[in-house]
Image (cartoon, rainbow, N blue to C red):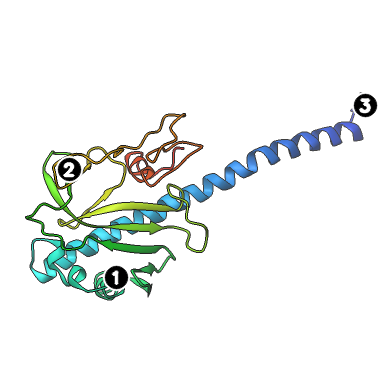
Amino acid sequence: MKKRGFTLAEVLITLGIIGVVAALTAPQLVMSSKNEAACSKLATTVSNLENAFQNAMVQEEVSALNETRLWTAAAGAATAGQIGRYMHIGNATDNGFFTKSGVRVAFNKTASTDRRGNENAIRTAGGSLLFQIGSVDIFTTPGQADRPGRNQFRFLIGHDGNLYPTGSLDNAVYNGNGAVAANVRYDKSSNANGGNACNSTRTTLACTARIVDDGYKMEY
């Protein structure tokens, strides 16, 4: 029995279908790959920073990060010079540094912070209060436009040397009067559009907490 091959028309139709499917799925695959890379860099940077902060406190024999030379340095670049003693960094910037993998880290120190005073505080998951001594922005793809929740993420820095993700209710920020700041929790509902929205159509810095909650995955 003679075998029948594919006709030219059938081959062209099949190739056309494959092309359409590829055109529809390729952008999603590229975006997924970028998101995974961003989350991986974010997790590594957070871990390295926390380890550096903890090591600084141990080496200087103090109980709070804002009592170390890392925090008493006058400027962010000076902080970068100090933190280079505890982790591998690249070039220093005006308020931070680049990591060896190209991630940009920018510090924002809270002025005149007294960890025993009435400055802003962080409520940990256990309910205890921890004084906030600043924040850090982590940019996973420097050189591109800053996109909060995509390549820009923010953490609060506690005097215990740990980082607390913006957008977390468990780590809500209290103001000096003891009131919880507005919109502290990320909103992942599909119609969320405010300053704490975190969904497929709108992302903000509050997405930082969602990524951490999801095990450093960008599920939006």
Q: Find numbered disc 1 in the image and state the secondary structure of the residue it sits on.
A: helix
Asked whether the residues under the numbered discs 1 and 3 touch, taking CB atoms below 8 Å apart as contact, a structural biologist would say: no
- Quarter assignment of residue 204: top left
- For label 3, the residue is 2
Q: Nearer the viewer, mark 3 or mark 2?
A: 2
Q: Earlier in the sequence, mark 1 or mark 3?
A: 3
Q: Earlier in the sequence, mark 3 or mark 2?
A: 3
Task: Identify the residue at the far front of this view.
Answer: 177
Q: Nearer the viewer, mark 2 or mark 1?
A: 1
- For label 2, the residue is 124
Residue at left offset 18%, top offset 50% = 120
Q: How much space separates mark 3 and mark 2, taking CA atoms?
A: 76 Å
Residue type of the residue flagged with mark 1: Gly
* Disc ID at residue 76: 1
Q: Quadrant of the N terminus?
A: top right
Q: Earlier in the sequence, mark 2 or mark 1?
A: 1
Quick check: 12 left or right of 194? right
Percent position of residue 43, x then y: 35, 52
Callout 2 environment at 10 Å: few (<14), some (14 to 19), or many (20+)? some
Residue at left offset 37%, top offset 39% = 196
